């Protein structure tokens, strides 16, 4: 009997191995780069002494952007655009109170934003609309000679992603996604620590957007965000989670995301919320699961875990975890570091006893590490950022760095390929889920240039 059981188990294992070997990832086409185009890794553009800006979208995020931008030297707000005239007037009020001249106003039609993009006195179009319009506006703005900065997610489909890439490559205009979480204080401190080798080689990272939106659904104009979740499945809002951790992994700067697998729960709460709040398309079953999780493997054998949940009661979390060969960092639910004692001693400035490799460093050591490895950008901007505000200051730092790089002719902190890699999860996770949680290839959006630059770095003027 034992021999038969062993034989059956052996055959089963062989069958399983055979299935796994034939379970190739779903291939995703990478369109050929159009003739005459070149990649924009490390793209620079002529310096702009005074950055003239047109802001499109003045709702939940747009008016705050106006406040932040006018607190940056060398910025002029030239034009404001929104579907709702009252929002444009609120933007004008912000300018007047700051002693700034009123901006040109656009609100007469759903395509008034095109008139803004056509102006010849704008350098940067700052897009803060609903998700469905982000990519279209971005492409149009670049085609009309403007750099563009787009709120998250900047693109929801692969077609939109490739349109933004091709337009940026063809026009040589910057296309940056306005991902604020990469400038948060813990994230940038941990990034600095990782870049200085305190964690050894980072081999696994985790990020998420876990935020119960129960109190916010009705604040989205025409209920656009709940409508999107009603009609689409997958991780539709991945950038806050994936942005910071991919910078640590040097994605398209020495490594690239290669394959993902995703799965979700049923929309237990999503369906109830749709019935309560109301959605435009009531003829379909609510699509997006309450909780979506995605695993990603990189070309160099590292792993990424990303989650999305806006439907259930849970404390806010972006997870943000780094696992390295010599250490660990974690932001949620509590901030902590775990380092080998030798790593602390070799750091040069901190030498403490009672450290081990399976527990968080004591509070005093934690504080000393945060002070020692505070990012140079934060040393320069933290005080001003917290005064101006925007998610504790990280929004202001995001805008400051964008303007700083434009004024100095530097590569932006986030390029169009970052945009593509972070946003592609929206469609690729859906493909994985709808095909039985199958592995899916992640395109090389640089089309062969992911290894040209070694290591993620912020650019500085000499």
Image (tube, rainbow, N blue to C red):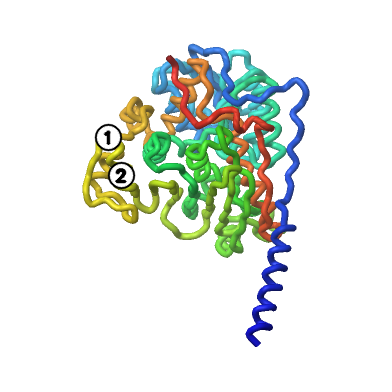
Q: Name the quadrant containing residue 43.
A: top right
Mark 1, secondary structure of its residue: loop
Quadrant, the N terminus: bottom right
The answer to whether residue 84 shows anywhere in this view is no
* The furthest residue to the bottom: 1
Q: Residue at x 31, y 29 (%)?
A: 383
Asked if labels 1 and 2 touch by Cβ distance under 8 angstroms, the answer is no
Asked if residue 134 lies left or right of residue 312, the reply is right
- Give residue 407's position: percent from left, percent from top: 49, 16
Looking at the image, is 67 positioned above or below residue 359? above
Looking at the image, is mark 2 or mark 1 earlier in the sequence? 2
* The furthest residue to the front: 3
Q: Which mark is residue 153?
A: none
Per the image, the residue denoted by label 1 is 348
Looking at the image, is 184 positioned above or below residue 327? above
The answer to whether residue 270 shows anywhere in this view is yes
Q: Residue at x 21, y 48 (%)?
A: 353
Q: Name the quadrant containing residue 292.
A: bottom right
- Give residue 112's position: percent from left, percent from top: 65, 27
| CA gap, disc 2 and disc 1 | 10 Å
In this view, the residue in front, 248 or 197, is 197
Q: Residue at x 43, y 52 (%)?
A: 316
Q: Residues within 10 Å of mark 2 (few under 14, many from 20)?
A: some
Per the image, the residue denoted by label 2 is 342
Asked if residue 139 lies left or right of residue 210, the reply is right
Mark 2, secondary structure of its residue: helix
- Give residue 32's position: percent from left, percent from top: 76, 32
Q: Residue at x 66, y 48 (%)?
A: 428
Quadrant, the C terminus: top left
In this view, the residue in front, 245 or 115, is 245
């Amino acid at each position: 009997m034992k021999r038969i059981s062993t034989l059956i188990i052996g055959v089963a294992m062989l069958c399983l191995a055979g299935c796994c070997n034939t379970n190739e990832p779903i291939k995703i086409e990478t369109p050929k780069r159009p003739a005459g185009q070149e990649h924009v890794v490390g793209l620079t553009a002529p310096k702009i002494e005074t950055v003239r800006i047109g802001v499109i979208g003045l709702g939940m995020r747009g008016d705050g952007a106006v406040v932040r931008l006018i607190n940056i030297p060398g910025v002029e707000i030239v034009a404001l655009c929104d579907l709702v005239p009252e929002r444009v007037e609120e933007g004008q009020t912000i300018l007047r109170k700051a002693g700034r001249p009123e901006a040109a106003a656009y609100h007469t039609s759903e395509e008034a934003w095109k008139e803004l993009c056509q102006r010849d006195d704008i350098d940067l179009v700052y897009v803060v609309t609903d998700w469905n319009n982000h990519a279209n506006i971005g492409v149009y703005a670049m085609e009309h000679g403007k750099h563009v900065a787009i709120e998250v997610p900047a693109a929801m489909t692969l077609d939109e992603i490739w349109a933004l890439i091709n337009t940026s490559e063809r026009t040589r205009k910057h296309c940056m996604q306005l991902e604020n979480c990469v400038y948060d204080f813990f994230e940038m401190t941990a990034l600095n620590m990782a870049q200085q080798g305190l964690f050894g080689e980072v081999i696994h990272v985790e990020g998420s957007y876990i935020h119960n939106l129960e109190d916010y659904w009705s604040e989205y104009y025409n209920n656009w965000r709940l409508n999107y979740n009603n009609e689409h499945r997958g991780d539709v809002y991945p950038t806050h989670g994936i942005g910071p951790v991919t910078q640590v992994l040097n994605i398209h700067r020495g490594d690239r995301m290669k394959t993902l697998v995703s799965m979700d729960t049923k929309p237990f709460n999503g369906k109830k919320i749709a019935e309560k709040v109301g959605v435009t398309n009531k003829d379909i079953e609510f699509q997006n699961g309450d909780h979506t999780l995605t695993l990603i493997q990189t070309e160099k054998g590292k792993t990424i875990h990303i989650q999305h949940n806006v439907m259930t009661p849970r404390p806010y979390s972006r997870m943000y975890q780094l696992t390295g060969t010599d250490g660990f960092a974690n932001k949620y639910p509590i901030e902590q570091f775990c380092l080998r004692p030798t790593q602390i001693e070799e750091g040069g400035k901190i030498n403490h006893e009672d450290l081990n490799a399976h527990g968080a460093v004591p509070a005093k050591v934690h504080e000393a590490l945060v002070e020692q490895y505070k990012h140079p950008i934060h040393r320069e901007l933290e005080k001003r950022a917290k005064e101006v505000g925007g998610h504790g200051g990280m929004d202001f730092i995001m805008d400051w760095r964008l303007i700083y790089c434009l004024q100095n002719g530097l590569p932006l902190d986030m390029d169009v390929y970052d945009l593509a890699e972070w946003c592609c999860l929206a469609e690729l996770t859906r493909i994985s889920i709808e095909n039985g949680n199958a592995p899916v290839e992640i395109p090389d959006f640089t089309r062969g240039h992911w290894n040209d630059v070694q290591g993620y770095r912020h650019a500085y003027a000499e």
